[in-house]
Amino acid sequence: MRFLSVYVVASLAWGWFGPVSAAPNAPNILVIYTDDQGSVDANCYGSDDLETPHIDALAATGVRFTRMLAPSAICSASRAGLLTGRFPPRAGVPANVSSAQGNPGMPAAQITLAELLRDHGYRTGHVGKWHLGYTPETMPNGQGFETSFGHMGGCIDNYSHFFYWNGPNRHDLWRDGEEVWHDGAYFGDLMIEEARRFIAEESEKPFFLYWAINWPHYPLQGTDKWRERYRDLPHPRDKYAAFMSTTDEIVGAVVDYLDELGIRDETIILFQSDHGHSVEERTFGGGGSAGPFRGHKGTLLEGGLRVPSVVSWTGTFPEGEVRDQFTSGIDWFPTLAEAAGIALPEGHVIDGKSLLGVIRDNAPSPHDSFYWRLGGNPEKAKWAVWQGAWKLLGRVSENVTPEGVAAFTAGDRGLFLVNLEEDPGETVNRAEDEPGVVEEFLALRDRYERDIAKTDPGK
C-alpha cells in the first residue's frame, strides 16, 4: 500500500530561501527517546535491580540530569514538545494523537527540529515510533525527515508489527510512507539495522537521527536472555526489567557502532524518556519505578514528568558530571540548534531555552517558572505550574496512590499545592495553608494560557 510517495518540502515561511550548508564541524546528533521509562529506571539513577550498562556508560561519558521534566506526561504531547521546542498546546498537540490511519496530528506548519536541521545542511532520519499524525503531511516525511522507518501509532507488537491497543487488528510498519512487512522479525533488531544503515550512509553532511524507541512501553517483550535474568523478580517488575535491559542492549548496539566508525567524538548523543512509567492494564498495572516521586504516566506529578536524561559529546561536553537544575524536554530544540551553530527561526515562538550553559558551565536553570497542560480544553484539562520551591497542580488525579498517603479528592478546583524542597514526594497539600501562593500561581497559570492562546496552533 502506498501512503506517501514523495518527500514533502516544508514551508520556509520564516524567511529562508533554500537549504544551506551545515556549519563547519557541525556535530552529528543522535536523539534516543525511550517510552514509559520510569524516573529512576537505570543504574545511574539509583536502580539496584536493573542492569543498564550502556545507559550508565553514556552517563559516565556525559552529563546526567536529575531534574529533567518531560514536556508532558503523555506520548504524543511529549514528542511534540521535544521536536518543536514549544509547550505542547502551543505546538497543537496538548494530548495524544489518534493512532488511526488518516487522522492528522501535529499541524504540518509547525517547525520541527528535523526541518530546522535539514534546511541547514543535515541529513535527517527517523526510526521507531512516531505517534504525531497519520496523514502524508503529518507523518515523518512531511515533518522534515528525509528518511523514516517505524510505526505511526502509539505501540505495536514487536513481532507482527500490528497496532497493540484495540481492534480492528491493523498492521503498522512503514518506510517513507509506504507500508512494509517484516512479519516475525523482532522490531528491536530492525531498529538497530535501520539506525546503523542511516548512520553509515556516505555523505559530507552531518546527520540528525531521531530514534524513538517504543520501549519499555507495552507490550513487554524482552529477549529470552533478559527474561531468564530477571525470572526471580516479582510480577510485573520481572517483565518490565527484561524489556528495560533489552532496551539498554539495543542502545549499546547503536552507540558502539559510532565508536566502530570512529565518529563518536563527532556526535552528540541525547538519551531521554518521554515521560514516567505506565500503570496501565496492558503493562500489568506497573513494573516501572518513580523511586521517591509520586505519580506515573498521565499525571503531572513528579513521577509522571521526571525522566532519565543524559547527554554525551565526548571530547566537548563534560564527562561524568551531574546537573540538578530544573530543565525540560522542550529545551533540546534550542540546545541542539545552538550546538549545531544554527540560529532559531526569526519571529517564531520557542518556549525552550538552550541548556549549553547548564551543560558546559553548570549555569543556573534558564527557567524561572514553567507550565504544563495535559488536555485540549484549558477549562477541563490537568495542569501544573512550577516556580521556585512551589508547584501547583489543577485537576490532579492518579491511578495508583502510594501506600500511606491520602488519595486525591476533587476539592475546590482539584488544586494541590506542594513545596518540592520540603516534600519532593508530593505527599502534603499546602493549598489551605498558603492561599497567597495559590492565588499567585493561578494568576501565573492564566498568563501562560493567555500567551499560548495568542499562537495559532496550526503554525
Image: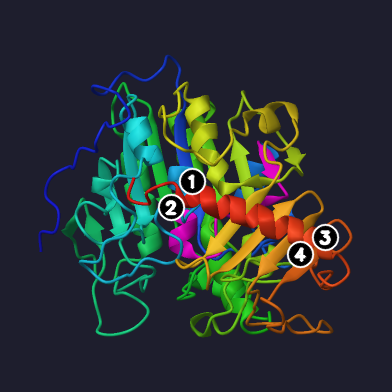
Residue named by callout 1: 86
Q: Which mark is residue 48?
A: 4
Q: How many numbered marks have been drawn onto this rendered protein structure?
A: 4
- Indicate the secondary structure of the residue bearing disc 1: loop
Instruction: State which tag comes first along the sequence, 1 or 2.
Output: 2
Residue named by callout 3: 436
Residue named by callout 2: 80
Q: Estimate the x, y position of residue 340 in percent, counting from the top left.
A: 47, 25
Instruction: State which tag comes first along the sequence, 1 or 4.
Output: 4
Q: Residue at x 37, y 56 (%)?
A: 128
Q: How far apart are the two marked residues, 1 and 4, measured between alpha carbons?
A: 35 Å
| In this view, 3 is above or below 101 | above
| In this view, 45 is above or below 155 | above
Would residue 216 be found to the left or right of residue 345 on screen? Answer: right
Q: Are there few (<14), some (14-19), or many (20+) residues within 10 Å of tag 2?
A: many
Along the line of sight, which residue is nearer the eye, 403 or 111? 111
| In this view, 2 is above or below 125 | below
Closer mark to the observer between disc 1 and disc 3 = 3
Q: Estimate the x, y position of residue 59 in percent, counting from the top left.
A: 67, 43
- Residue kind at label 4, given as amino acid type: Asp
Instruction: State which tag comes first along the sequence, 1 or 3.
Output: 1
Instruction: State whether residue 456 appears in this view.
Output: yes
Q: Residue at x 41, y 58 (%)?
A: 93
Closer mark to the observer between disc 1 and disc 4 = 1
Q: How far apart are the two marked residues, 3 and 4, measured between alpha carbons?
A: 42 Å
Instruction: State which tag comes first along the sequence, 4 or 2.
Output: 4
Instruction: State whether residue 69 appears in this view.
Output: no
Q: How far apart are the two marked residues, 1 and 2, measured between alpha carbons?
A: 8 Å
Quadrant including the N terminus? bottom left
